[in-house]
Image (tube, grey):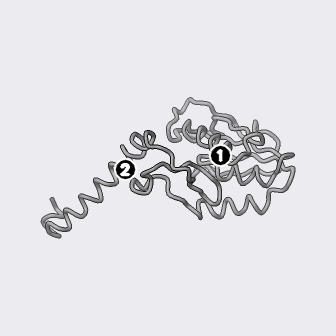
Amino acid sequence: SQVLKEEGVFAFIKKSARFSHRSVTQKWGNSQLRNHLPKSGAYQTYNGVIVEEKRIGDDLLNAFPDRPSYEEQFVEYIREYVEECDSVVVIGGYYGASTVAAATQAGDRGGVTTFEATPEGTHRVRKTARLNGIQQSVTVKAASVGPIYNPKGRDPGDNKIPPNELPDCDILAIDCDGCEL
């Protein structure tokens, strides 16, 4: 009502429409409607990594758009420092872009173990590895590392491992959105 009083009826309608579109696409459209739409045969990519098959209507819903610069610096470092045959541990995988980048660099004789605290992230990393054909080089563990109190979608008592129980590795890649310490 404040927008209506201060900016007029057109501003109110415009802001209401934007709010409604965001609410519908993010809360209902992306999670409920999207899963029932047919697949389009095209794929979304995040920093060159296939993360999801597009569905008809994705552009209209703004669901999972391509993100060419997704975690750009982190993935760039992985591509620069991981070498053939390396053993890599990734803490925080969510979409799986860093896991795929590491597995691609490490090759068939290397390997990647990814720890992901959220159930949806664990599922997504596995799916991304499969879509990129590197699932044989990747192990995904549904666990948080260290004293994480309440990551998204997890209860504080869920599967946690102390840092000293991480597997030996050549490269440790940590990307857990503010929980790095």
- Residue drawn at x 36%, y 43% as measured from the top left: 28
In-front residue for pair 130/175: 130
Quadrant for the N terminus in the image: bottom left
Q: Where does label 1 land, which residue? A: 131
**Measured Cα–Cα span from mark 1 to mark 2:** 25 Å
Disc 2 residue type?
A: Thr
The residue depicted at 70 percent of the width and 63 percent of the height is 76
Q: Position of residue 153 (x, y in %)?
A: 50, 37
Task: Give the numbered dot on residue 147.
Answer: none
- Residue 41 shown left or right of residue 21 in the figure: right
Is the residue 113 above or below the residue 25 in the image?
above
Residue 78's place in the image compared with 155, above or below, is below
Above/below status of 29 relative to 69: above
Circle nearer the viewer, 1 or 2: 1
Picture coordinates of residue 178, whole percent (x, y): 57, 52
Identify the residue position indicated by label 2 in the image: 25
